[in-house]
Image (cartoon, helix red, strand yellow):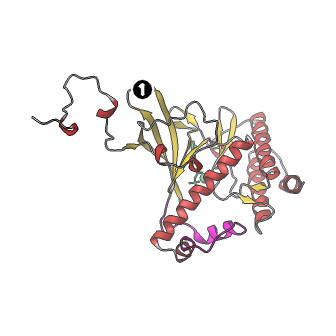
Amino acid sequence: MTFDETSFAVPAFSVPTFATHEPIDGQRWSTWPATMPSERGPQPWPAWLVTSAGAFDTELGIVKTGKEADVHLIERAVPDDPSRTVLLAAKRYRDAATSDFHRSARYQEGRRMRNTRDSRAVARGSAYGRQVAAGRWAYAEFETLCRLQTLGLPVPYPVQVHGTELLMEFIGDGMTAAPRLAQQRLDGAELAGCFDQVVTIMRALAAAGLAHGDLSAYNLLVHHGRVVVIDLPQVVEVVSNPSGMDFLQRDCVNICDWFTRRGFECDADELFGELVAEAFG
Ligand SMILES: Nc1ncnc2c1ncn2[C@@H]1O[C@H](COP(=O)(O)OP(=O)(O)O)[C@@H](O)[C@H]1O
Ligand SMILES: [Mg+2]
């Protein structure tokens, strides 16, 4: 009898080893090893990060479907090592024809766009171009998350970006996502406390020359009383983007309208003035 590796049979009573595991339906090998250093989150990596090439990603369900992206819950875990397991939010950008190219063109004003073959494909809206565009959104959001994470803003830790998928820290308890600010019933003191945190976030963004661009009570999560800002693909440079000031003002109006309707009086013009001074200061 000849002996080669493929003819090894797994003994029936062996302890399962790493090599005996294969991903089943709803699983894949961890995509971490396939990412380049620039596609990984800022160092030092958090202690909970699972970087093992032997880890699996398991689909646990949909957190939320949206127009431009769907957010899924996944578990990244090393089989047979319960200490190496983490829940992650996977934001998957759609490459569907429905995603909003007009809006995207406006957001991209002032950003450097080279006239590459990819850019022309995006402009044409071909299937390949749509894929490229979806990937650009994922990378834009990832890069912003990295920048804000490094600045110390309360954002989900950006784990990696790969193709059209962004993986980040899952903000929640167990498998339950933290509620959006919009879903919260808050009393006076809690409202004031949240407003304070939101303004601190906006001020830090403005100091970095940025406006969120789509800030609302739907893109703020409240986790154990702490406000976390999400949904950042369209973050704009306040100064260099011709629409930057409009976006900043709209963010101020959205936030102040929401808090005022809930019974916490605040003034959008005043906030806008303060943030403009911060951005140009
Ligand atoms: N890191 C995260 N942790 C927990 N829930 C998240 C996370 N990121 C997104 N979500 C949930 O998914 C929803 C959609 O994500 P978001 O980034 O706002 O995308 P969209 O463009 O669809 O609005 C959020 O309102 C929130 O409920
Ligand atoms: Mg959102």
Residue in front for this viewpoint, 37 or 91? 37
Residue 219 to residue 45: above or below:
below
Does any portion of residue 47 appear in the rendered image?
Answer: yes
Name the residue carrying label 1.
81
Please report the residue visible at 22 percent of the width from the left and 37 percent of the height from the top.
5
Please report the residue visible at 70 percent of the width from the left and 37 percent of the height from the top.
186
Please report the residue visible at 45 percent of the width from the left and 37 percent of the height from the top.
75
Dot 1, crowdedness within 10 Å: few (<14), some or many (≥20)?
few
The stretch drawn in magenta includes residue 103: yes
Please report the residue visible at 52 percent of the width from the left and 36 percent of the height from the top.
176
Label 1 CB less than 8 angstroms from ligand 1: no
Quadrant housing residue 264: top right
The stretch drawn in magenta includes residue 80: no
Residue in front for this viewpoint, 224 or 8? 8
Q: Amino acid at mark 1?
A: Asp
Position of 142 compared to 11: left or right? right
Q: Is disc 1 placed on a helix, strand or loop?
A: strand
Position of 81 compared to 135: left or right? left
Where's residue 82, x and y in %? 44, 25
Magenta segment: 94-119
* Furthest residue toward left: 1
Where's residue 191, x and y in %? 75, 39
